[in-house]
Image (cartoon, grey):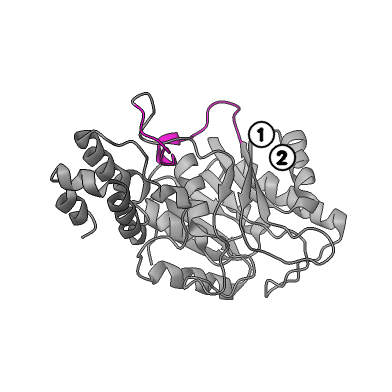
């Protein structure tokens, strides 16, 4: 087991209290939403005020352990998100940065009322302006090549589309709320640097530690269910062929790459910029390149070179 990746079995608040002040660079976590889900060791069904007090306790500890330039991403259901927002801003004194909507195309079906198709993620920072945000590491491909565009890509915005972790996904674990790895990839790349320490006080199936492992971060995960700790450690030991999800825009090939030299340089850079953690998506990207620019690649003698990028 990598000593830089630690899965701790225990109560989130008690284990957080053992961590030194300002020792964590980033917190990304998906706490229980108090929706009566079965997490093995406990049923997620506290009374309203009990849940708020539970949220208050762990959020205060999260603030204490967070470095001065650190950030907190917290998933939260609609019933309690406004209360969590208020605790973070009004009681703890953190600084609101972004309200992210994770949109997915399939979810719970309802016959009375509208079926939910999104989750929400709050991003708060400890300092209003001095915090890590690596925009270049999370950009998405442009739709069109223009000399005035930043061809490193565009800001992904605050509405993110990633597929749910369907039960047919080969990486799906026996956990009721497993999140896609690429969702965590974006947050971790954006708000931490290589070698820094990222924490998840509600580790669940171990997604955060897996992403830290593949992106060069140190990781600490806490969960009170020993089965989930075992699950997380097993994930860390399994071979890596690419994260289990991807923003489909990462495979997008810009239109109007008509200059031969610019085109080949861009195609090579695209794989490095956008698909570094998604080797299993490279072949699909190369096929789209050949579909869109096949004749131009042949005419410029670049067709074979592009095919070699998939080897």
Q: Is 139 covered by the magenta stretch?
A: yes
Classify 10 Å Cα crowding around label 2: few (below 14), some (14-19), many (20 and above). many
Q: Secondary structure at mark 1?
A: strand
Most foreground residue, 171 or 85? 171
Q: Position of residue 141 (x, y in %)?
A: 41, 41
Q: Secondary structure at mark 2?
A: helix
- Of circles 1 and 2, the one toward us is 1
Residue at the outermost left position: 301
Q: Are marks 1 and 2 in contact (CB under 8 Å)?
A: yes
The quadrant of the rendering that contains the C terminus is bottom left
Residue 295 in the figure: left or right of residue 54: left
Residue at the outermost top position: 148
Q: Is residue 304 visible?
A: yes
Q: Is 245 covered by the magenta stretch?
A: no
Mark 1 highlights which residue? Answer: 96
Q: Position of residue 269 (x, y in %)?
A: 28, 42
Mark 2 highlights which residue? Answer: 88
Magenta-tinted stretch: 125-146
Location of residue 235 with respect to 131 vertically, above or below: below
Q: Is residue 67 visible?
A: no
Which circle's residue, 1 or 2, is located before the other in the chain?
A: 2
């Amino acid at each position: 087991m990598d000593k830089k990746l630690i899965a701790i079995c225990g109560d989130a608040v008690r284990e957080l209290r053992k961590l030194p002040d300002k020792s964590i660079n980033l917190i990304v976590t998906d706490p229980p939403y108090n929706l009566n889900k079965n997490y093995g060791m406990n049923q997620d069904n506290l009374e309203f005020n009990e849940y708020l007090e539970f949220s208050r306790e762990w959020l205060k500890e999260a603030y204490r352990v967070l470095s001065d330039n650190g950030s907190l991403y917290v998933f939260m259901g609609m019933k309690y998100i406004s209360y969590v927002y208020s605790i973070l801003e009004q009681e703890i004194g953190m600084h609101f940065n972004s309200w992210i909507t994770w949109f997915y195309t399939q979810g719970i079906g309802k016959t009375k009322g509208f079926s939910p198709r999104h989750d929400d993620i709050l991003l708060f920072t400890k300092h209003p302006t001095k915090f890590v945000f690596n925009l270049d590491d999370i950009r998405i491909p442009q739709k069109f090549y223009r000399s005035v565009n930043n061809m490193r890509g565009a800001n992904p915005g605050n509405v993110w589309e990633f597929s749910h972790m369907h039960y047919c996904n080969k990486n799906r674990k026996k956990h009721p709320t497993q999140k896609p790895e690429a969702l965590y990839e974006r947050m971790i790349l954006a708000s931490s640097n290589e070698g820094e320490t990222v924490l998840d006080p509600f580790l669940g199936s171990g997604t955060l530690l897996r992403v830290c492992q593949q992106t060069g971060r140190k990781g600490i995960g806490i969960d009170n269910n020993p089965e989930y700790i075992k699950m997380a450690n097993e994930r860390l030991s399994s071979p890596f062929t690419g994260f289990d999800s991807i923003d489909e825009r990462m495979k997008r090939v810009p239109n109007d790459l008509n200059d031969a030299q610019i085109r080949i340089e861009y195609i090579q850079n695209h794989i490095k910029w956008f698909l570094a953690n998604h080797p299993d998506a490279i072949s699909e990207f190369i096929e789209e390149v050949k579909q869109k620019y096949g004749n131009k690649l042949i005419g410029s003698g670049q067709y074979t070179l592009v095919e070699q990028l998939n080897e």
